[in-house]
Image (tube, helix red, strand yellow):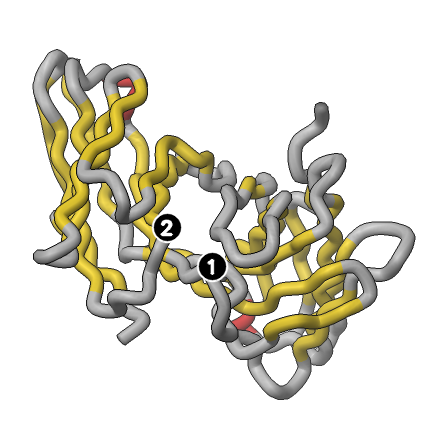
Amino acid sequence: NAGVMQNPRHLVRRRGQEARLRCSPMKGHSHVYWYRQLPEEGLKFMVYLQKENIIDESGMPKERFSAEFPKEGPSILRIQQVVRGDSAAYFCASSPRVRGLSYEQYFGPGTRLTVT
Amino acid sequence: QQQVKQSPQSLIVQKGGISIINCAYENTAFDYFPWYQQFPGKGPALLIAIRPDVSEKKEGRFTISFNKSAKQFSLHIMDSQPGDSATYFCAASIGAGGTSYGKLTFGQGTILTVHP
């Protein structure tokens, strides 16, 4: 059973460009969370999605950031017009979560975004 | 109220010793407390987790101690090995009801170094 897959593993963008980060959850998992890890800091929640639905985007900046999890294909985190402060490691985690319980979240290897 | 405070920031232990990392939380609605291990350049890996209805959980050399009244929990690594050298994160989440949807709130991380 393959783990959570993320690509690309490393992404370099110039200021003003768009970054698209992809996440394929573990087989059988329909819940995806995105987290951001700034250098020397812990992980911060960004957004929680189920198939075709954004459930909680309270941790995501209001501008330039968007996320989706279509019926078919991976979850996408999109950052438009990137700035240097967006440089970070972005992790997605998937969960087999059942309603009402906190289930394990399994993390992917991350995408390390560098904005030059 | 959503904060999780982790200490120490860094820890140096001799091979064979016991590593102890502590976390404290404020929000009594948290109902799931996992620990993650992260190696440089990798994603966090779930180590062990506990729910507040038990005071201790042991898996191999790793033990979580949970003190509900003090709102504290800790990770003990017995017989620490150089291969345990990594960054450890505690986390907490709320699963049942509300609008937290199981998203994880992380501590700041502890860099563990085990000397041979």
Q: Is residue A7 visible?
A: no
The residue lying at 71 percent from left, 27 percent from top is: A2
| Residues marked 1 and 2, same chain | yes
Q: Nearer the viewer, residue B38 or A30?
A: A30
Furthest residue in direction bottom, as rendered: A63
The residue carrying mark 1 is: B95
Q: Is residue B68 visible?
A: yes
Q: Is residue B85 above or below residue A34?
A: above
Q: Residue B65: where, in percent of width, then height?
A: 17, 37
Left or right, residue A107 beside residue B108: right
The residue lying at 31 percent from left, 21 percent from top is: B59
Left or right, residue A53 beside residue B32: right
* Element assignment for label 1: loop
Q: Residue B27: where, in percent of width, then height?
A: 26, 69
Left or right, residue A10 beside residue B2: right
What subunit carries mark 2? B
Q: In the rendered structure, find residue B32 and report the number of the disc placed on it.
A: 2
Q: Are marks 1 and 2 in contact (CB under 8 Å)?
A: yes
Q: Is residue B67 above or below residue A65?
A: above
The residue lying at 65 percent from left, 75 percent from top is: A82
Q: Nearer the viewer, residue A87 or B17?
A: B17
* Element assignment for label 2: loop
The residue lying at 40 percent from left, 37 percent from top is: B38
Q: Nearer the viewer, residue B43 or A24?
A: A24
Furthest residue in direction right, as rendered: A72
Q: Is residue B47 above or below residue B82?
A: below
Q: Residue B47: where, in percent of width, then height?
A: 38, 31
Q: In the rendered structure, find residue B9 and report the number of the disc placed on it.
A: none
The Cα–Cα distance between marks 1 and 2, rounded to whole angstroms, is 8 Å
Earlier residue among tags 1 and 2? 2
Left or right, residue A77 beside residue B46: right
